[in-house]
Image (cartoon, grey):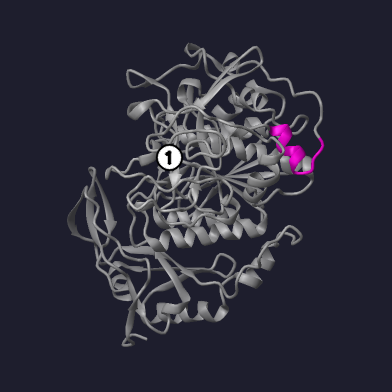
Amino acid sequence: MGDAPRVELAGSERTPLPEERRVSPADPGQRVEVTVQLRRRGALPDRGKARPHLKRREIEEIAGADPEDIARVEAFAHDHGLDVVDASPARRSVVLSGPVSALESAFGTRLFLYDIDGAVHRGRQGPLTVPAEVAPAIEGIFGLDDRPQARPHFRPLLRDGRPVQAHAVAASFSPVEVARLYDFPARATGAGQCIAIVELGGGYRKADLDQYFQGLGPISPAIVSVSVDGGMNQPEGNASGPDGEVMLDIEVAGAVAPGARIAVYFAPNTDRGFLDVVSTAIHDDVRRPSAVSISWGGPESAWTGQSMSALDAVLQDAAALGVTVLCASGDAGSGDGAADGLAHTDFPASSPHVVACGGTRLTAGAGGITAEVVWNDGAAGGATGGGVSDSFDAPSWQANASVPPSANPGGRRGRGVPDVCGDADPQTGYRVLVDGQATVVGGTSAVAPLWAGLVALLNERLGRPVGFLNPELYGAVLAGGGFRDITDGGNGAYTAGPGWDACTGLGSPRGGAILAALGGSVVVGRRKAPAPPEAAWRG
């Protein structure tokens, strides 16, 4: 294979970032692990309403990696002096390890160190190449680059650059209060369900979680930390950093579904880490999550084609397995933080195989919602992401949603983001405990775990996983009055209006109506919302 003709891998092109500066060649002796993502051995079956979800063993047998493809990659590794660390037919991945010099030879590239905003990362430019005889088996190579791939979509409420103490904010809510306002199913705790939470940095402190959940009520979720690619639970001690994301995700999901098990999957913030952590969670045959919450992402333009294609394929696996994936749509309005002045949707929220979650500003009084509008606090305060995908076509279930053309030149018709929404404005945010601080946090990061908790409640009450929800959301749930339509506000390039819009999707949830539309019975009477949690842990 060493002298065989080589071909470029489609979608592997890396273009220079405006802010990166080349420092030096990478150390040729440094050992690096990469994940080689393989093609499916067969197509996933078309899933109609009558077809049951696949089991994890079935998806491996039907659409996992072909053993012959794994053998080809192992032979390729041997020819280039690389070690095989792991091979997973179900996840369609082979992990290889070797020195930088061997990896450069194997994949036809050069690796350099780049300074990006003051931090040094390993990276490359241009496409990757592999021998022609192994190329058809490979869909992507991940791990040569270790630059940050995504950012967390949470927004702490700050004053003078410091997190605001929860007791000083009159308009904030506990997650249980938000669930009550949205009429989440009563007399359900998420028992028997596992919620997976994906994290690319930061960590949690058990003492904080114990204190927080003790202040909410008698039931506390069981929590486990899972390490992927060397990522681990490492709190930094900064409530405004990644710890804020991790704690927000756990505390919102755990408060809404206290009877569920919460599995927190930690991985490095790289394209390889993101792919591997989502794949690990979805294919986890030990904890078997029925809902996955992802609050990290970035504009589609920040991803290589192979990265988006490979991660979207994993999300297709989730749909086939009956796992509901909820993704934050971003906190930087219709531009999603890109510097080119164009509209961008956030990935993975733009994947047609996830429920994309946008954000609102929620006002309540007299035990109910008095107003709800698009979250948009301007450039400094953040705004809900949303728009029209540049990478994914409009799915069939959005055919009647009146998704507008993209605001970008050419007016592309594509997948509309988000699908649903919920409270996200930090000015009306969630009371949480982070690194010992009782504070208020918002962002669409809060909406993904909020909806993941709702999915756990629905699964418990229905006695089955709701699975890939989008066709039902745009069909029976919408027809059954499952949403509160948000018609006021905008996120920059797009404005809200009656029906679906590119700011808040179909609307915020009416939990009881969603349960009824999916075939469940609605129980009269609500779980009493406990006292605001900071009453229990305010210093």
- Magenta stretch encompasses residue 518: yes
- Of 149 and 331, which appears nearest the observer? 331
Q: Is residue 469 left or right of residue 524?
A: left
- Of 314 and 235, which appears nearest the observer? 314
Relative to 74, does residue 344 appear above or below in the rendering? above
Instruction: Give the image location of residue 8, x and y in percent.
Output: 33, 75
Task: Tell me where residue 517 sits by quadrant.
Answer: top right
Residue under the point 70% across and 48% down: 466
- For numbered disc 1, what is the local secondary structure? strand
Instruction: Give the image location of residue 281, x and y in percent.
Output: 58, 53
Task: Tell me where residue 44 sits by quadrant.
Answer: bottom right
Task: Tell me where residue 25 sits by quadrant.
Answer: bottom left
Secondary structure mostly seen in magenta is helix
Q: Is residue 458 left or right of residue 84?
A: right
- Magenta stretch encompasses residue 82: no
Instruction: Give the image location of residue 526, x and y in percent.
Output: 76, 24
What crowding class fits label 1: few (fewer than 14 Cα within 10 Å), some (14-19), or many (20 or more)?
A: many
Relative to 211, does residue 97 appear above or below in the rendering? below
Part of the protein shown in magenta: 511-521
Relative to 14, does residue 439 appear above or below in the rendering? above
